[in-house]
Amino acid sequence: MTPDIKICGLKTEEALAAALAGGASHVGFIFFPKSPRNIAANEAGRLRQAALGRAKAVAVTVDADDATLDAIVAAMAPDMLQLHGSETPGRVAAVKARYGLPVMKAFSIRDAADLAAIGPYRGVADLFLFDAKPPRGAELPGGNGVPFDWRVLAALDPGVDYMLSGGLNADNIGEALRLVSPAGIDISSGVESAPGVKDVALIEAFFRAVRVAGKKSAA
């Protein structure tokens, strides 16, 4: 089964068009001032119009308060919220109830022990995202271009739906999909020519690599 593909950190019409042309199931917009992929809510709202009926628009936030989320939801009308901070299960439940939207909760993973953290969120979050733990001193919780050992996900309950993230690119996605079977793939820095600068050619190459990996797994 071909996994969903989320191209995250979009800021331009050209990059969004490439993501949609490649068949992205999700397109992500990041609302975190420290990130080079940060975007204004009204600009994300304008861009996401092209995705209507084609891909789910995801608003990515980090420990955002209600006022911030209110403004994002009003301006962008996302299909899904991604919480990429230290949000508690109670906060996830409150966000779901407040906006009536599905919520994807991100977790930073280094080894199998880190997977224990998802327990209290099962049945609360609609989907998990597993990213690599940020390098020491990093200011961003994600988008750092570093992978983790995907083999640790073998310890997961098969019933856990998740998106795989962290350091993915056209060169390593085949190996990742050989080792694990995520419901989806999330990529941001792996399709950039510089931090926050999406590269259309890299986006196209990534989709080609995913298709090649899919053909190999079906063979």
Image: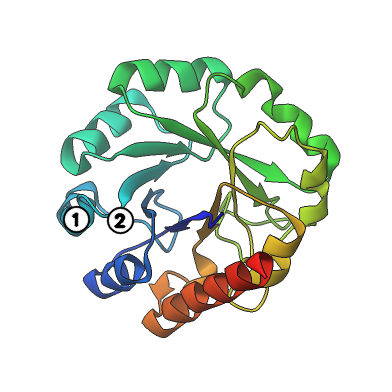
Relative to 17, say whether 118 is above or below: above
Q: Are marks 2 and 1 in contact (CB under 8 Å)?
A: yes
Image quadrant occupied by the N terminus: bottom right
Determine whether the residue tagged by mark 1 lies in a helix, strand or loop. helix
Image quadrant occupied by the C terminus: bottom right
Task: Judge from the rendering whether residue 205 lies leftward or rightward of residue 165; answer left or right.
Answer: left
Task: Judge from the rendering whether residue 48 lies leftward or rightward of residue 191; answer left or right.
Answer: left
The residue closer to the viewer here, 20 or 34, is 20
Snapshot quadrant of residue 106: top right
* Residue displayed at 55% across by 70% down: 210
Relative to 82, say whether 173 is above or below: below
* Residue displayed at 54% across by 27% down: 87
* Residue displayed at 25% across by 52% down: 40
For the residues labelled 2 and 1, the Cα–Cα distance comes to 7 Å
- Note whether residue 195 is visible: yes
Task: Judge from the rendering whether residue 106 lies leftward or rightward of residue 174; answer left or right.
Answer: left
**Residue underneath mark 1:** 43
Which amino acid type is marked by label 2? Ile
The residue closer to the viewer here, 87 or 19, is 19
Instruction: Report the disc number at residue 39.
Output: 2
Relative to 128, say whether 183 is above or below: below
